[in-house]
Amino acid sequence: MSEAKKTTNPKEIQTWAEKHGGVPAIIKGTANSGKGEGLLRIHFPEKSDQDDKFEEISWEDFFKEFEHSKLALLHDPNSNFNKLVNRD
């Protein structure tokens, strides 16, 4: 793994995710009524055997919750390693 990079840039996040086969998703059953989408993830359906755990959402909904929760993406530009972290 090369050095991880932290970003909040939506275009950079979407480009990186799509390059590695990732889609915006939430973990099913984690939505709070009126308080957001649920726990965000970038899901890699072709590399996962847990597809039933994730619900794909639009990039628009992903970034709305991403901004609301003040998150950043820590990722390896050359692999699908990623983690959503606080911006601080």
Image (tube, rainbow, N blue to C red):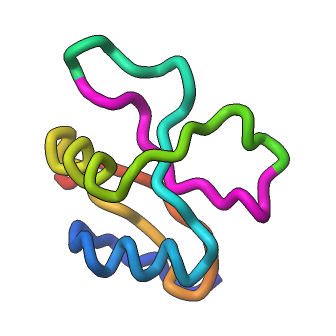
Looking at the image, which is closer to me, 74 or 46? 46
Residue 10, picture quadrant: bottom left
82 vs 88, left or right, is right
Bounds of the magenta segment: 36-48
Looking at the image, which is closer to me, 60 or 11? 60
35 vs 39, left or right, is left
* Residue at x 46% of width, y 54% of height: 24
* Residue at x 52% of width, y 76% of height: 18
Residue 52, picture quadrant: top right
* Residue at x 21% of width, y 15% of height: 34
Q: Residue furthest top?
A: 33
Residue 51, picture quadrant: top right
Looking at the image, which is closer to me, 71 or 10? 10
Specify the quadrant that holds the N terminus: bottom right
Is 39 included in the stretch rendered in magenta? yes
Q: Is residue 26 above or below residue 17?
A: above
Q: How far across and how far down the image is residue 74, in percent? A: 41, 65
Q: How far across and how far down the image is residue 33, in percent? A: 29, 12
48 vs 27, left or right, is right
